[in-house]
Image: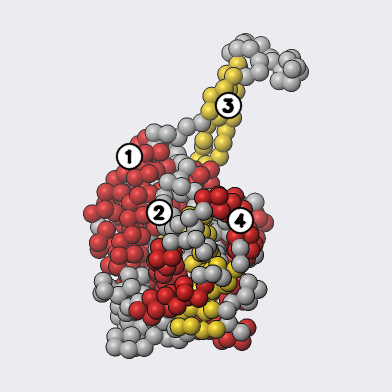
Amino acid sequence: MARGKTAGAKVLAPGLNYIGGEWLPDEDGLVLESRNPADIREPIGSFPNSRLNEVRAAVHAAKQAFKTWRLVPPPQRGALIRRCAQVLRDRKEAMARLMTREMGKPLSEARGDVQEAIDCAEYYAGEGRRWFGETTHSELPDKFAMSVRTPIGVCGMITPWNFPVAIPSWKIFPALLCGNTVVLKPAEDTPACGAAFVKALADAGIPAGVVNLVQGIGEEAGAALVNHPDVALISFTGSSYTGSAIAEACGKSLKRCSLEMGGKNAQIVMDDADLDLALEGALWGAFGTAGQRCTATSRLLLHKKIHKTFVAKLVKAAKALRVGDPLDERNQVGPLVNQAQLDRVSVYMDVARKDGATLRCGGKRATGPGLAHGYFFQPTIFDGVTPEMRIAQEEIFGPVTSVIEIGSLDEAIAVLNGTKYGLSSSIYTRDVNGAFRAIRDIEAGITYVNGPTIGAEVHLPFGGVKNTGNGHREAGRSALDIFSEWKSVYVDYSGKLQKAQIDVQA
Ligand code: ADP
């Protein structure tokens, strides 16, 4: 779905790749065009449509830069990352406005996206003085033992459009802190945001070649990065379909790979919950970023005792949400990112009706003054959904939520767990015993109690179980395990050959 905005032929002042410290055009003069999804008449810019040659050049630059960057002491790497935080802070408003224009999330959410990158930089800057390993005793006398983290090499980062600054930051800052160099291939729907982010890092003083930017489409530039033999690691966020293809390619060459993919997140509302609070959470979780978050609340599991009242209130509140130009701060729901995404969400309306769900509000493209040239879709609620229906199982990535009635906490948890994904989850209840059972039994990487399914903070692990990921966690200290290797070191100062497990037996 990522190529919906890229087909235009008009060449504007072109954006550039950033390779080895230089801003360079595409070798063949090919361009990708980016347009405002709230009004597709407005061009944002044109960018290189890079292929193998540009990727090769970027990987080469990163490989050269790795020779020196890996030797920079981690506290100094951290200090440079702190400078990145400052530059991002200085440019926060401009970057947020660009983001809103390029991918359509409301301005307040775009500011949050840039803030997340600032937080992330601050966090990993601090980690520069905490890049700890372990020291321990050998089982043999006069022998010292320790473990240290070491960098991996050139890391290829492949990122989506829905968090076009925050997600690259989650990957790039911990990778840099660990002494790696980077080639970023941002989503083809948000090349301007990718460029603005890399420019901030370059202007903050990240040395030439340490971070490189290659714009282009997934099947060309992305695949070239995945398949390049000098790329030691791929860190990917995007669809399960693409993630699976990347994992397969990485598996063949035994390349390290961390994947962050889809979700089908549910919010449980029990009969003892604070219903007004749960309602606010549901609205924010389901319709924030027009539902285009991997942690969006795409299922609402409502206890049968509160089901009817809750749905009535939710429908009223959803109908009252203001859909429109995301730069206008009175609007709460912006457009979908591109035509392909609009088509995809529209198809699910028919799927839901055929499966027997009841449409309670929305269900079609939003129309009205100022909406004609954008990909706007009405906030949509389906009721009477059963757990096995396609809209309750498949990731839609739009302002659509499905209500499923449940009779008990056990049933709610079973339904919540009954998809192939396991990213985020939420329960609203005042019963502390029930909340702790949910924390224990829900199969997801993230569980919120009395909060919506969205709201991750950068110092905690982020990621999911089952088909959402492949066992890694981004953010927090856990990201350091993606971007570094452990080395165990033994120093024998006995002056003689000592044999572990043979000289000494417990
Ligand atoms: P979405 O559907 O959310 O756009 P994708 O998984 O298609 O998600 O895209 C996420 C990122 O993966 C984008 O940067 C895209 O260009 C890239 N991508 C898509 N296909 C491939 C591929 N075959 N190889 C490498 N990267 C890809």
The mark that comes first in sequence, 4 or 1, is: 1
Q: Residue at coordinates 63% horizontally, 59% vertically from top-left?
A: 410
Q: Label 1 belongs to which residue?
A: 79
Q: In whole angstroms, how far apart are the C-alphas of marks 1 and 3?
A: 27 Å
Return the x and y of residue 73 as percentages of the image width and height: 40, 34
Q: Residue at coordinates 29% horizontally, 45% vertically from top-left?
A: 83
In the picture, the disc for residue 169 is 2
Q: In whole angstroms, how far apart are the C-alphas of marks 1 and 2?
A: 16 Å
- Helix, strand or loop status at disc 4: loop
Residue 39 in which image quadrant: bottom left
Query: Left or right of 389: which side holds 287?
Result: left
Q: Nearer the viewer, residue 71 or 248?
A: 248
Amino acid on which disc 4 is placed: Glu
Q: Label 3 belongs to which residue?
A: 489
Label count reads 4
Q: In whole angstroms, how far apart are the C-alphas of marks 4 and 1?
A: 38 Å
Q: Dividing the image into 4 quarters, which one contains the C terminus?
A: top right
- Helix, strand or loop status at disc 3: strand
Q: Residue at coordinates 38% horizontally, 44% vertically from top-left?
A: 123
The mark that comes first in sequence, 3 or 4, is: 4
Q: Label 4 belongs to which residue?
A: 443
Q: Nearer the viewer, residue 327 or 28?
A: 327
Q: Is residue 334 above or below residue 126?
A: below
Q: Nearer the viewer, mark 4 or mark 1?
A: 4
Amino acid on which disc 3 is placed: Val
Q: Residues within 10 Å of mark 1 (few under 14, many from 20)?
A: some
Q: Is residue 317 above or below residue 474?
A: below
Q: Residue furthest top?
A: 495
Badges 4 and 2: C-beta atoms under 8 Å apart? Answer: no
